[in-house]
Amino acid sequence: MTKTIFVVDDSASNLAMAEEALEKHYRVITLSSAEKMFTVLKKLAPDLILLDIAMPEMNGFEAIKRLKAGDSYAEIPVIFLTALTDSFNEAYGIELGAVDFIVKPFSEAVLLNRIRNHLLIDDLIRERTAQLRERSAQLLERSEHLVRLQNGIVHTLADLLESRDKNTGGHIDRTSAYMKILINAMMARGVYSGEMAGWNLESVVSSARLHDVGKIVIPDSILNKPGPLTKEEFQKMKTHASEGERIIDNAIKQTGDAEFLRNAKLVTTYHHERWDGSGYSYRLKGTDIPLLGRIMAVVDVYDALASERPYRKALSHEDAVRIIMEDSGRHFDPAIAEVFYEIQGNLPAAQVK
């Protein structure tokens, strides 16, 4: 396909010389001013522009600034065709985005070779850019597919878990929704925002669905007991945090240390730790508890309080929030509990009267 070259110069003789040199090889459009070039550009984009610098009304430097300022013309290679030979003008032109300078008067051979080389470079760049865009699109499609697959597996596993645990129906969906609301509010208020910088919120929220995955190994007789647990049964129930950690660790060994699994390990392992150090499984204290575990602790306990169990009725939203705040600084990170209190009205349970 024949390439199109714009030659922009206020000298009729220069336009004629350039056209004569190029017309056997390219489609040549000669234009006597930069203003006329921009008028034609609205209808036709060339493959390369030969642009004079010293022109009235709009000189070549002003013209290239305008070309490079807009998305429509920024990628068109520009060669300055000029009698200005000092190094300052050449350096300035290159800084503005020109790919080359050709000094007038020019020879036909020099003009053709320079244009041929820059068109070849431009073709290679466009080809490589197209390849990179195609590859990026393929990677994005693959990534999206993997995310859908990941989410599908997580939802299936979560549904399997809840089908066993007759006492906590809907707990996983609710805590995931609460966690998203709470994290957004923390970010908006700058609470631990530095630590959360770079978090993929959707990945974090999805991973939170696995926080009770360790309950898979808890016997049904304990998991679905219709009354309070004995001391021994409660000790067995507490192992679901360490068992969940083991399960996620095995998944990491099999599939790699993906961000999603790292997040899942944090919420699974640490959501029963307490701010005062009296929790389990590691009895961590304060900010030694990973942030995801501290956030999960608040929404997990809130949902447990506000949900009905076989051995007690659900507490009201107001009573559940009150208990969370009473345990701020003992069970819960006080900064997170404060944000939770501030946004309590945004929780779905608060809107059900």
Image: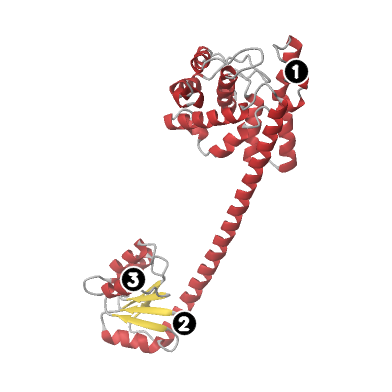
Image-based side of 72 in relation to 277, left or right = left
**Res. 223 image quadrant:** top right
Whether residue 86 is situated above or below residue 339 in the rendered picture: below
Residue name at image x 60 percent, y 14 percent: 313
- Residue 11 in sight here: yes
* Relative to 96, 153 lies left or right: right
Query: Extreme front residue here?
Result: 353
Q: Which of marks 2 and 1 is in front?
A: 1
**Residue type for callout 2:** Thr
Q: Which numbered dot is residue 222?
A: 1
Q: Position of residue 113 (x, y in %)?
A: 46, 82
Marks 3/2: CA–CA distance: 20 Å
Image position, residue 182 (x, y; %): 50, 28
Position of 317 relative to 214 (above/below): above
Q: Measured from the top left, where is residue 230 in percent x and y?
A: 74, 10
Q: Which amino acid does label 3 sit on?
A: Lys
SS category of the residue bearing label 3: loop
Distance between mark 2 and mark 1 Cα atoms:
79 Å
Q: What residue type is labelled 1?
A: Ile
Q: Earlier in the sequence, mark 3 or mark 2?
A: 2
The numbered disc on residue 195 is none
Q: Which residue is drawn at 56% across and 39% down?
A: 202
Q: Where is mark 2, residue-wise?
A: 2
Quarter of the figure with residue 83 = bottom left
Numbered disc 1: secondary structure = helix
Q: Which residue has dot 3 on it?
A: 42
Badge 1 crowding class, 10 Å Cα cut-off, few under 14, some 14 to 19, many 20 or more, is some
- Report the side of 88 relative to 169 (left or right): left
